[in-house]
Image (tube, helix red, strand yellow):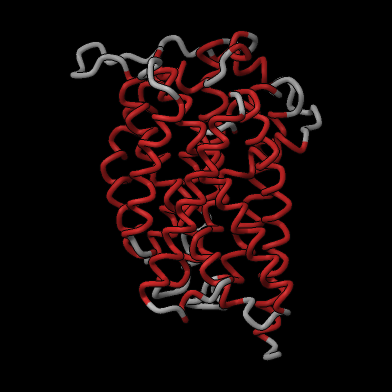
Amino acid sequence: MNRYFYYLILLNMLVNVFMYVPSILIRERFDGAVLALPLGVLIGTIFLFLFVFSINKFPKLGLPEIIEHTPKVFRNIFLFFFALIWFFAGSITLLAFNNVIIRFINPDITGFNMISAFLVLIIMLLSLLRSDKILYTLEIIFILNLPLILIIMLQAYTNNYLTIDSVLEVGTHLFEVPSLSAIAAASFVFSGYANLVIFNRVFKEKINWKLLWIIPIVGFINLITSVLIPIGFWGADGVGDLTYPWIATSDALRIEFGPIERLTTIFILLYVSVATISTVVHWHVALEILKSIFHVKKFKQKKKTIFTWVILVIFGVGVILLEMNIKENTIFRFGEAWLNIRLFSEAFLIILMVLLSRRKKNGT
């Protein structure tokens, strides 16, 4: 099951390209974003290793079971807060790709209609799939999308319009002090490991340490690619005018004699599948945490089903209300605020996990 751990991290790295991370770092390309990249990798790597070290002490247990013996009030508040964190993680992804689909594929459809269509699919998947089935679905999506990812990366790095001078110009601002938003955005690349707070229940073995060193390398390459490729294509100044840097960049890529000439079509297809499964993963974690708060395991099957559907309907209504009441710029600021809150929340989660693992080791 170890490979599914890496799938969860890779999923987060891909969503990083689609979400607001590149936009935040590109916005601050002259104001500390360059230094934020290695700092984000360092923070993310430390969090990753500490979390894996801690979660390995609790095989086949999720976060609700791990903190079962903490005070009830603390446990419920803590779990409810993190359920909200994961709900908003999925919601932000859903709102972001809903805007992209409307803008670049079908501008005539309303935001309500488009997001409702995706919600039906996501809610059906959540109601039908258990944790292990979601991981299997994630694996299938990666197998199908890996060729598309490789094609896009190859075309981006070998394109004649990629200007190294623009990248080097931004690189001269290496020693500018980064903002909290830049560091939070850069460290988000590694946050996929946190989904183990629920998915660890279905892992039959502990996470193997031998291959963990690969993750910081891949994460750094992912950050470099997601930020510097758009800068290389559009220039150090011109890239600042783009709302969705990677959509515009993919639209500049061509396969002259390919069956699909414009890579933006491939990119958006990849975007839809990755964003959908990412929302499913995050909402599944939120749903399972809420189930643990209300001790749904003790319910009869009919009540379990009703509870699940009530929570999923609340999730759907919440996202629709967000879509109808906030504008695109507000969604961007909302996503940026969530990334900042996530950084501190993740740090608190790591500290708690380390303390609980040490307590278990000492037998207290």
Q: Position of residue 232 (x, y in %)?
A: 54, 16
Image quarter of residue 128:
bottom left
Q: In this picture, is 165 found above or below 286?
A: above
Closer-to-camera residue (101/3): 101
Front one among 69 and 46: 69
User: Where does the C terminus fall, quadrant-wise?
Assistant: bottom right
Q: Would residue 61 appear left or right of 123 to someone viewing this image?
A: right
Which residue corresponds to the image point at 30% horizontal and 45% vertical from the top-left? Answer: 141
**Measuring 73% from the left and 74% from the top, which residue is drawn there?**
73
Tally the marks.
0
Q: Residue at x 70, y 55 (%)?
A: 345
User: Outermost residue toward the bottom?
Assistant: 363
User: Is residue 12 found left or right of 255 in the rendered image?
Assistant: right
Residue 152, x across and y down, in percent: 36, 26
Q: Is residue 30 found left or right of 60 in the rendered image?
A: right
Q: Is residue 70 above or below residue 266?
A: below
Q: Quadrant of residue 82?
A: bottom right
Classify residue 32 as left or right of residue 4.
right
What residue do we see at 35% from left, 44% from top?
120
Q: Is residue 346 above or below residue 118?
A: below
Q: Position of residue 1 (x, y in %)?
A: 37, 66
Q: Position of residue 64 (x, y in %)?
A: 58, 73
